[in-house]
Image (spheres, rainbow, N blue to C red):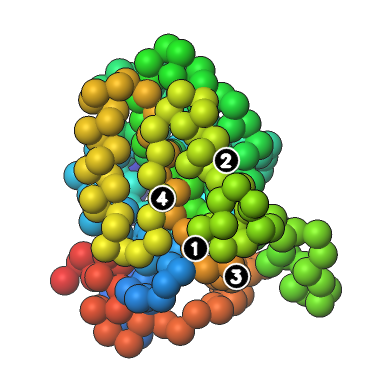
Amino acid sequence: MSPRSAAAGRLKDRGAWVEECLESKRTLLRKTNFDNVPMKPQRVYQCLNRAFDDRDTCYVTTIGLSQIAAAQFLHVYKPRHWINCGQAGPLGWTIPAALGVRVADPTRRIIALSGDFDFQFMIEELAVGAQFNLPYIHIVVNNAYLGLIRQAQRGFDMDYCVQLGFDNVNAPELNGYGVDHVAVAQGLGCKAIRVHTQAEIDPAIAQAEKWMAQHKVPVVIEIMLERITNIAMGTEIDKIVEFEELAGSLADAPTAVAAMLD
């Protein structure tokens, strides 16, 4: 509704609802402060909020369970700083979209976010970033699964042909997670680093920023996730299904927007 409508008093008073939300915020926060290894995606986004919470970070992503989770947990403050390329598809556009944002704005902090299959779908485009010196950070949250399709199959008691993991004979250290994204990114002329724990994320970001300054190429940070995580969603805004325990206190969700209101 326009400011003119507000001035004319045609806006419904939502004050009571806002107060109700604020009153209940401590018991309705989604927990993010998990210590699990392999990591839960909720903790990854908590770490990214703390690492990039300068109110000027542009996120680029596309459809997938990683995008749905990120949209629920990441802090975005400005227009055109959450670029969901393709909206409901197609997969793989994250890399070329991030490169396009870099061409349009050589100074913006760009963080691309992909699940493992979105990343694989057009991974060869990393070479374009190396060829034309277009640096940005690409976060790959890897659970070796088609996570959104797997979660949709739950209603049919299925888990059919959506697993992407295998024992990679050239990278046994991956422990069944399949594609060696670090090796592929390096083969395409970029830099890459793999992390397994929360404590490794900040040092990996610092290293990525050094590499970008030095080599002027995209830098991939692959974060190894637990294989199966269900992200909250539902058929209606008032019918959201929560799959994880809710926060017991603000300490369980330290970067939640509600916590920032205190």
Kind of residue sitting beneath label 1: Leu
Q: Is residue 143 above or below residue 234?
A: above
Contact between labelled residues 2 and 1, with CB atoms less than 8 Å apart: no
Q: Quadrant of residue 241?
A: bottom right
Contact between labelled residues 3 and 2, with CB atoms less than 8 Å apart: no
Name the element at disc 2. helix
Name the element at disc 4. strand
Q: CA distance from mark 1 to mark 2?
A: 15 Å
Residue 133 in percent (x, y) is at: 37, 16
Kind of residue sitting beneath label 2: Phe
Of the two numbered discs 2 and 3 on the same chain, state the one appearing first in sequence: 2
- The residue lying toward the viewer, choosing from 68 and 129, is 129
Residue 102 in percent (x, y) is at: 38, 22
Q: Which mark is residue 225?
A: 1
Residue 190 in percent (x, y) is at: 43, 28
Q: CA distance from mark 2 to mark 4?
A: 14 Å
Q: Which residue is mark 4?
A: 194
Kind of residue sitting beneath label 4: Arg
Question: What residue sits 38% from the left and 44% below the top?
Answer: 193
Of the two numbered discs 4 and 1 on the same chain, state the one appearing first in sequence: 4
Side (left or right) of 65 relative to 103: right
Of the two numbered discs 1 and 2 on the same chain, state the one appearing first in sequence: 2
Of the two numbered discs 3 and 4 on the same chain, state the one appearing first in sequence: 4
